Amino acid sequence: MSRVRILVLTSSTGAGHDARAQAFAEWCFELYRHDVDVRIEQMLEKSSGFFKAGVNLYNWIQKKSPWLHKLFYLFVELLSVLNRTSVSFGRAYYEQVLHSYRPHLIFSVHDCLNRGYFQLARKILGADHVRCATYCGEFSGGFGYSVNWVEPTADLYLSRTTTARDYALKLGMPPERTRVRGYLMQPRAYLEVLNEQTRRTYRELHLELYPDRFTVFLATGGNGANNHLELLPVLLPHAEKLQVIVICGRNREAFNEVVHWRAEHPELECYVDGFSEEVHLLMQASDAILTRGGTTTCAKALHFRCPIIFNALGGIMPQEVLTVKYFSRGCGAQQVANAQEFGVLIDRWMKTPIDYQQFRRKFLDLRYEENPTVLIEELVELAQSVAGTTLHPRPFPPKPRGH
């Protein structure tokens, strides 16, 4: 049995929470190998039929009617009352996991899996035998920042930005137990970095695109919510100057439609994929990304220096508002409410490249460099404090075999 056991609580409302859970597990194995065991539980879906229906409704709203999420968000906020001191729905399954796994650390990466969950873990395992931590991926505070993120008894509260951390303090999180810790991306994102030459090579050999042409990335989340067929036509007038990368997530219908559209418009160079494990490389190969305000995608875009255009077609979900607000105030980020606005923006950038260059410089001013292992080591140390063991991480990046 591993010397340290960490239970990660997540849910597939969108793709970002699960992506952070997976990244954490990969980092633990990268740094500690078999000394740290990470068990990821999609606690909402697996513990309660009521919550599973809520997750499905959330993902339907994200795909079809983002504006409806304002009502859904207000309903979710009621969990702060239901789970004030314990878990209401799905308690039996959560208790079963706690009894069988007996984690040293409960690590939540989802807003609905903090309040009540930490208290119940301490009750079952003993307050001296488990620690609790939260990673909040929001960029800023205000409407859309769920009160459920903040459980004041958490041993450690990690925020993506100083702005978001300040809002957590406002909601009652003790300052001495908060940290600002940035991206939480997979280890490969720090190993697979393109310079200017390899960027050109990647475009030409892997994507079969022009190495030096302005490249627009039409992105989507894992669920495949997109407006690709509305947006692609406005790029046609600039087919001699730009090219497009399109991903469709796990939306097979969207993938088929975009492939058909590409066949009918050979004048516009397009690379099309479904669900991609190489988004970090596609961003590095792009000059701009059109995406909704998903925190994981936007954090990656910032890290990989790919300026963001926010997709506001159909409205913006409350938590996406937090991301859009952060980038709009920080660098004047653009958002487009329809295909015509997207076309106007691209027209301006193609006719006046200096406008794009000025925006890109402001965008890059928001970047920060970080050591990605610090966050992982802090969490493992928290688990070690009750596991009664001392672990030492391996160096990163690792040395090649044979050295």
Image: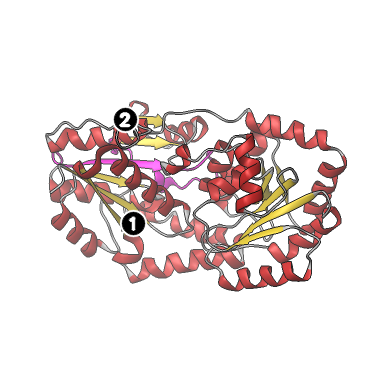
Above or below, comparing residue 291 to residue 326 in the picture: below
Q: How is the image coloured?
A: secondary structure
| Residue type beneath disc 1 | Leu
Residue linked to disc 2: 395
Q: Nearer the viewer, residue 183 or 311?
A: 183
Give whichever of discs 1 and 2 has the lower sequence position: 1
- Structural distance between the alpha carbons of marks 1 and 2: 44 Å
Q: Which residues are magenta?
A: 127-155
Q: Which mark is residue 208?
A: none
Looking at the rendered structure, the kind of residue marked 2 is Pro
Q: Is residue 259 magenta?
A: no
**Residue 263 x/y as whole percent:** 74, 70
Residue situated in front as seen by the camera: 77 or 193: 193
Q: Does residue 49 appear left or right of residue 387 in this picture?
A: right
| Between 98 and 120, the one nearer to me in the picture | 98
Q: The residue tagged with tag 1: helix, strand or loop?
A: helix
Mark 1: few, some, or many residues within 10 Å (few <14, many ≥20)?
some
